[in-house]
Amino acid sequence: MADDDQRQRDFTTIQYETGGSRVARITLNRPDSRNAQNFRMLYELNEAFDRAAQDDGVHVIVLAANGPHFSSGHDLRDGEADDVLAERRPVGTWCGFGCAGAEGTMAKEKELYLGLCERWRNVPKPTIAEVHGKVIAGGLMLVWPCDLIVASEDASFIDNTVAMGVAGAEFFQHPWELGVRKAKELLFTSRPVSAADAHRLGMVNHVVPRDRLTAFTMELAAGIAEQPLFALKLAKEAVNTAQDCQGRANAMQTSFALHQLCHSHNQGLYDLPIDPAFFEAAPSKAAAAMAASSEAAPGTSHG
């Protein structure tokens, strides 16, 4: 456990732990902001995934969250974003984070949002999202790259980016997670999808009572971890490749470009990357969906 203690001292927004069951557990740890994802959290998550992937003693990775909700999305109040970008070596090959206009915006989102999600989807070990409470917009971009999703009965899933004047979150996995028509309904209405509906549609593997969520997930992970690791890696790669052969990768690039067009359109009209009417609707249903519950999240989300 000494190594875990040292690793934990390296992180400020997440927790990382391993035990004797060949399972690494990564936990989002910004509960006061409902785990809104600032740039530091995203880079720390990436480092944790890399550590688990490179640890031959780890066969399965679980992603969980502290606090009442899994994640309220991307943190619009991230005051240290530029400092984090300056101190970190980029993970992807994109560049120009400090450039003006659409060039800089696209560069940051290609690195931090689309790029990291694709990396996590392709981590060569099984990953399980352990989900409770609200999962909003950018929060979906943490659970969808995972191989399996276990949700508590109170979990719900929301993409309210269209209400912000943006055509869906950057990691546009919606049609493959929910099917085409439910994906459109999710985007068009900003209404939540319940855990039960997500399970019925095939997006969620298991729905369990909240007080059983962690135990059930860890039992599932421990069972998978007993399988031969090389076979697990190759089975995952086979399924991911099958999905990509359906056109997922090309569709993702197109949807990301359309997302950037929305930002540029809003910037030209309102001098903001999202439509300010979203904020002006503040006691409306759009704001209520964003708030995640009656306990409004200090960190807020955009796609």
Image (cartoon, rainbow, N blue to C red):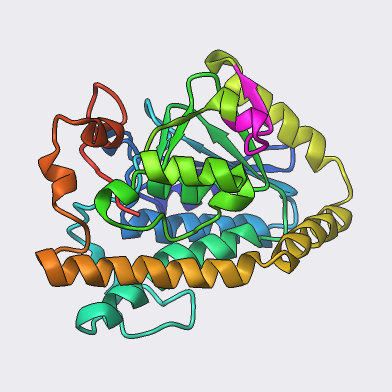
Please state the horizontal and vertical placement of residue 36, each as a whole percent of the image: 32, 44
Drawn side of residue 34 relative to residue 198, left or right: left
Q: Residue at x 80, y 39 (%)?
A: 224
Compared to residue 145, the image places residue 266 above or below, namely: below
Q: Which residues are magenta?
A: 198-208
Q: Residue at x 31, y 54 (%)?
A: 38
Drawn side of residue 75 relative to residue 154, left or right: left
Q: Residue at x 15, y 63 (%)?
A: 272
In depth, the one of 108 and 43 nearer the eye is 108
Compared to residue 225, the image places residue 3 above or below, namely: below
Compared to residue 201, the image places residue 119 above or below, namely: below
The total number of labels drawn is: 0
Placement of the N terminus among the 4 image quadrants: top right
Report whether residue 111 is seen: no
Drawn side of residue 48 relative to residue 163, left or right: right
In depth, the one of 235 and 178 nearer the eye is 178
In depth, the one of 252 and 16 nearer the eye is 252
Residue 256 appears in which quarter of the rendering? bottom left
Please state the horizontal and vertical placement of residue 24, each as a whole percent of the image: 63, 44
In magenta stretch: residue 250: no
Report whether residue 298 is seen: yes
Placement of the C terminus among the 4 image quadrants: bottom left
Please state the horizontal and vertical placement of residue 225, each as a whole percent of the image: 79, 42
In depth, the one of 199 and 211 nearer the eye is 199
Please state the horizontal and vertical placement of residue 251, each as a whole percent of the image: 57, 67
Q: Residue at x 47, y 40 (%)?
A: 185
Drawn side of residue 124 relative to residue 186, left or right: right
